[in-house]
Image (tube, grey):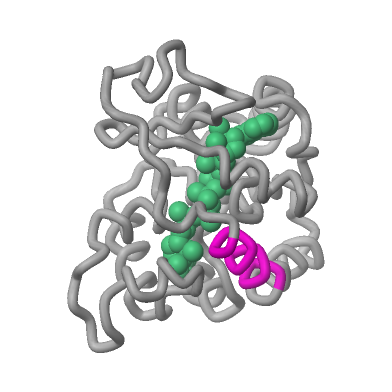
């Protein structure tokens, strides 16, 4: 049986990274995340400028830069959870040509909750584990439970940039959600439940759809 190929969609702060960690642990698949890949290459010079300029404004990085990252990652993956891509309909087209998908998940969360989650998020500088000052605090303030690394706030998690990212999502990425809904493959998950409840729903769907 082959490893599942999973797409996880959701607005900024919907919990894609949090639940991708669970999927990776449960099914032993790769986590392909364009956000992390771009953050690791923020100052890379491209013909469009650096990714940093787009990310700090909350805008999308140009498609050719992101498509190249995804293409390379898909080539190496035996089963994956794809997080942060596709973010517009052109990226959907590129993805359709690159791979098939077994499961398409959409984490549905209201706008007010998204802003609260983004502005309260803290991320480990060393291992990338996500925390939240209210909903998922570390045992010791500012220190990662998993590796002892320092917890920092992402540059794009200020309230102003968070709101801009949510608007960019509504304009560019909701059509992607609609596309998969119209195809009849979208699995909608109530993302406002606790992280454990969200995970239980996701696991049920993946076990049924992907038969891993
Ligand atoms: P990216 O890194 O992909 O960010 P995003 O999509 O905005 O998503 P986030 O990582 O902010 O949120 P998440 O859904 O993973 O939530 P998380 O689990 O952390 O993209 C960043 C930028 O890169 C973009 O703005 C763009 O510029 C560029 N980019 C990336 N991909 C691109 C592409 N394809 N094309 C063009 N540009 C691209 O959770 C959030 C917080 O909530 C955490 O603190 C967590 O602890 C907490 N939390 C999670 N679940 C729950 C829950 N159930 N209840 C309560 N709290 C919860």
Image-quadrant location for residue 52 = bottom left
Above or below residue 47? Residue 201 is above
Q: Is residue 162 visible?
A: yes
* Residue sitting farthest toward the top: 139
Residue 168 image point, x, y percent:
62, 72
Instruction: Find the magenta span and give its range.
Output: 160-170
User: Position of 124 compared to 158: left or right?
Assistant: left
Residue at (72% x, 63% y) in the render: 177
Residue 4 seen in this snapshot: no
Q: Is residue 12 above or below residue 131?
A: below
Whether 51 is among the magenta residues is no
Pick the residue in front: 120 or 101: 120
The residue under the point 29% across, 29% down is 150
Instruction: Assign the C terminus to one quadrant of the image.
Output: top right
Figure check: 101 above or below 93: above
Relative image position of residue 78 (x, y in whole percent):
36, 42
Q: Is residue 193 left or right of residue 166?
A: right
Instruction: Report if residue 169 lies within the magenta region.
Output: yes
Q: Front-most of 134 and 181?
A: 134
Residue 203's spot in the image, x, y percent?
Answer: 65, 27
């Amino acid at each position: 049986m082959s490893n599942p190929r999973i797409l996880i969609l959701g607005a900024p702060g919907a919990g894609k990274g949090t639940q991708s960690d669970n999927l990776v642990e449960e099914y032993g698949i790769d986590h392909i995340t364009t956000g992390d890949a771009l953050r690791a290459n923020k100052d890379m010079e491209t013909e469009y400028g650096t990714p940093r300029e787009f990310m700090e404004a909350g805008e999308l990085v140009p498609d050719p830069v992101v498509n190249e990252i995804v293409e390379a990652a898909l080539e190496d993956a035996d089963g994956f959870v794809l997080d942060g891509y596709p973010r517009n309909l052109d990226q959907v087209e590129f993805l359709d040509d690159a791979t098939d998908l077994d499961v398409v998940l959409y984490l549905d969360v209201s706008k007010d909750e998204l802003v609260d989650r983004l502005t309260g998020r803290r991320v480990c500088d060393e291992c990338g584990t996500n925390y939240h000052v209210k909903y998922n605090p570390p045992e010791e303030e500012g220190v990662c439970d998993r590796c002892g690394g320092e917890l920092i706030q992402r540059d794009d998690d200020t309230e102003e940039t968070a709101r801009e990212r949510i608007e960019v999502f509504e304009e560019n990425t909701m059509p992607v959600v609609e596309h998969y809904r119209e195809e009849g493959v979208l699995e909608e998950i109530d993302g406002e439940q606790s992280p454990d409840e969200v995970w239980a729903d996701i696991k049920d769907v993946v076990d049924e759809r992907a038969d891993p």
